[in-house]
Image: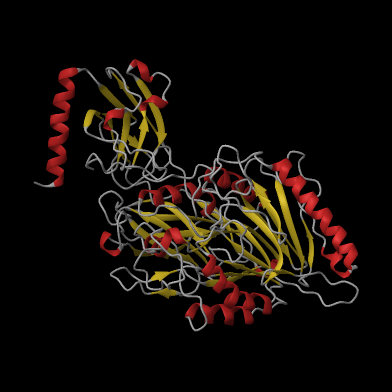
Amino acid sequence: MTPFVTFTLLIFFSLISSSSSSQISISVTPKTLSKSGDFVTIKWTGIPSPSKLDFLGIYSPSSSLHDNFIGYIFLSSTPEWESGSGSISIPLVNLRSGYQFRIFRWTESEIVPDLVDHDHNPLPQTKHLLAVSEEVGFVSGRGPEQVHLALTGFEDEMRVMFVTLDGKESYVRYGLTRGRLGRVVKTRVVRYEKEDLCDAPANSSIGWRDPGYIHDGVMLNLKKGKKYYYQVGSDSGGWSTIYSFVSQNRDSGETFAFLFGDMGTATPYLTFLRTQDESKSTIKWISRDIEALGNKPALISHIGDISYARGYSWLWDNFFTQVEPVASRVPYHVCIGNHEYDWPLQPWKPDWSSYGKDGGGECGVPYSHKFHMPGNSSVPTGMHAPATRNLYYSFDSGPVHFVYMSTETNFLPGSNQYDFLKHDLESVDRVKTPFVIFQGHRPMYSSSSGTKDISLRKRMIEYLEPLLVKNNVNLVLWGHVHRYERFCPLNNFTCGSLALNGKERKAFPVQIVIGMAGQDWQPIWAPREDHPTDPIFPQPLQSLYRGSEFGYVRLHATKEKLTLSYVGNHDGDVHDKVEFLASGQLLSTGISDGPADTVHVESKFSWYVKVGSVLMLGAFMGYIVGFISHARKNSADKGWRPIKAEEI
């Protein structure tokens, strides 16, 4: 008996059973949606003796077995649930198949303690079906979705990628005016299959969904710094809406970028994994900033742990739908994180590493297909899965040279990645690009990264940090730890200094952790009375600022100065800042006129004291210790998000 026949019989007998006991009805409007993000309203009536655990299961495709829902909503989340009636309105993402909604009765006596979600809450059981809706679908011929841009490494080009249902021949048409998209390029198309993925849930009936066909086209011969309009699709499959972007101009002497890690995506329902509601705020504030730039080019840098799909493929669709408003306007650049890649049989897994099962069986396959970064870095998986791509690369944008690495694959001397990073950093033209920004996922330095990555960080400090110091890298940015933390200019745990009285300046790289864009498993820095067993991570003197709020960092660079600002999602304001001169000198840190209710007070550690007398240094350090203690006391438990006690 096929799964479809089994499913049909289950529905049939369940409906007979439910109709004999009550007149339960469920309806959905509208039946056809135009595009991802459109809302449907589900209404139900006639549920007898409602239970707090009665729930609405969300299914796509509509032929899915009961246990293979993509999400669920408890009916008790609606105000009128105790009457046996209610309604819910939610947006849907186009998964290239129909949706169906089913209502189930579930009681506390049927909870299975070992069957839990990501937060260890019991997953709903589907034994007692009460009602089934009609199918909801998306209209055909509306064109592709999930549009996102990327730089190619050539100034006069812009890459655009998107997804279609059938993979038929598609194009990108573009031009300098909205009404004349006269230039046309053809796209290449790729896809991956269930067999390409490494493990469950990615290749199981619960996690796998058809990913569609991924198109990749490059707009050519672009004029510098011009606003272009573009559209993707075909006459047969339909054309997308018209988008726009501003082309790169390396001669402008100016760079704008928005950088963060660990953002993820939000869903309007519960699912097997926790999703990241705060990611919506991150996109909202970045959209504001892009709009304020007007006709100036910019880029986004997302340094690992991208969608947090971890094997549940519809979360990738949610992610690209959520970021499309910004990713269709500015290039969206990424590097790989543990939640895109790690699995037990990955080809490089030394005994000192902390690589595990964080990728949910994806082994880098969706990441490698859905993005196309500059360069041609790749690593074979050693399995049926195709090679993993988008691992390490670099490009110039105005006066900034951006470098990306993979912390999940071999970075030791002798590896292809190490050779690339060494050659790339040694080849930077500091007249052309006076600023160098280095990025990866797992941090080299963090005061709150637990114990898992200690051995990995030791190797990074031993082998990679000398490259950063020798080549005068200005900024080093990391994710993985879900906080913002800025360190002093560092080399082997030792702070550098500014040039004073003719003495030699030690311009070490400034390391900053920026993994605060959405994921809410955040390490703890201050004790809380209601969490007595949670680990506490004290702040070392090398750590100059730690921000407790979600957010992102905003970069603005000219030929003379680079400014990096930490923007908090709770208010959209700047809460920390660091500035460099083109000479490499650290000009200033912190903010002097922040809002009065800012959670964390900047600990202003002046490195000028180092040239003073021993007595003066001792006095100053005494002041700093007292100041930090006072600041931490004042900031403890103010504005902190709920914290999960778990290593990253």
Question: Measured along the vertical axis of the image, is residue 305 above or below residue 521?
Answer: below
Colour theme: secondary structure
Q: Residue at x 30, y 51 (%)?
A: 209
Q: Residue at x 34, y 47 (%)?
A: 95
Left or right of 541, for residue 177: left
Location of residue 168 in the rendering, given as x and y in whole percent from the top left corner? 30, 59
**Left or right of 397 on screen, residue 63:** left
Q: Nearer the viewer, residue 370 or 478?
A: 478
- Tally the marks: 0
Q: Looking at the image, can residue 157 be seen?
A: no
x then y, percent, for residue 397? 63, 67
623 relative to 352 in the view: left or right? right
Q: Residue at x 83, y 56 (%)?
A: 622
Q: Residue furthest top?
A: 83
Name the one closer to the observer, 378 or 155.
378
Residue 301 quadrant? bottom right
- Displayed quadrant of residue 439: bottom right
Percent position (x, y) of residue 411? 50, 75
